[in-house]
Image (cartoon, grey):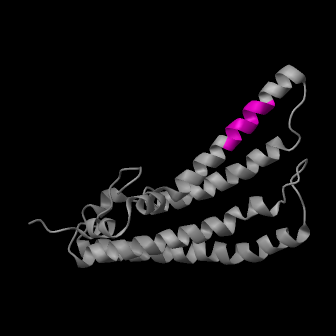
Amino acid sequence: MSKLTFNQTMKAELPSWALYIERYFEALLSIIALTAIFTIILSDIIRRTIFGTQLLGGFEIAIGLFIWVAWLTTSLAVRHESHFRFTLLRKKMSPRMDMMMYIVEWALWLLVIGMIFWQSIPQYQRYVTSGRHLVGTPIAEQWVYFAIPFSMALILTRVVQNMYIKLNQYRHGENICPDADIGVKE
């Protein structure tokens, strides 16, 4: 009988659709936004070429959606631990020292992203009260800038989630050394 790792135990507790959403939530939203950006730009190119006109607010909408994609994919990278880190040095560290590095990393994430989140809330409230719209559209500007507090909250959630997972892996004696692979991890 084989011993289950902490990650395998976690997977056994959630239904497969919930695991999929948890793992790819940011990616799904980003794909929707990228598809909308592609559609807006392509339709503007076709309209300009054939009819000599274009969607008035298309460029502003595309920029707003790109802001969402940038922040959502940052959260996705934190979730899958595929952000920038120094793995060459960490491979030579003991598990205890590696855990210390994780604690420093988490403290920095919580401090910096926590500050951005905290500062983005009053800024977002100013956008809500201003009532301004994206140029040439009925879309309120606040929906573009909601990406910042929303994504910062997601990043903070993903950091806390990683803390929970890594601390439990460390307690169970599993390997916690980060690898240099970039991409989606189980």
Q: Quadrant of residue 81?
A: bottom left
Give the magenta range.
Answer: 36-44
Magenta region's main secondary structure?
helix
**Vertical position of residue 38 compared to residue 50: above or below:** below
Res 42 → quadrant: top right
Residue nearest the observer in this picture, 111 or 47 = 47
- The quadrant of the picture occupied by the N terminus is bottom left
Q: Position of residue 154 (x, y in %)?
A: 56, 68
Based on the picture, tell me whether residue 42 belongs to the magenta stretch. yes
* Count of numbered tags: 0
Taking the image as drawn, is residue 137 in sight? yes
Q: In the current view of this chain or complex, which residue is farthest to the top? A: 50
Residue 122 falls left or right of residue 71: right
Residue 186, x across and y down, in percent: 35, 57
Is 124 placed above or below 28 here?
below
In this view, the residue in front, 150 or 98, is 150
* Residue appearing at x 37%, y 67% in the figure: 14
Q: Quick check: 4 above or below 73?
A: below
Q: Residue at x 22, y 69 (%)?
A: 174
Confirm whether residue 101 shows in the render: no
Left or right: residue 25 versus residue 179 is right
Q: Position of residue 104 (x, y in %)?
A: 43, 76
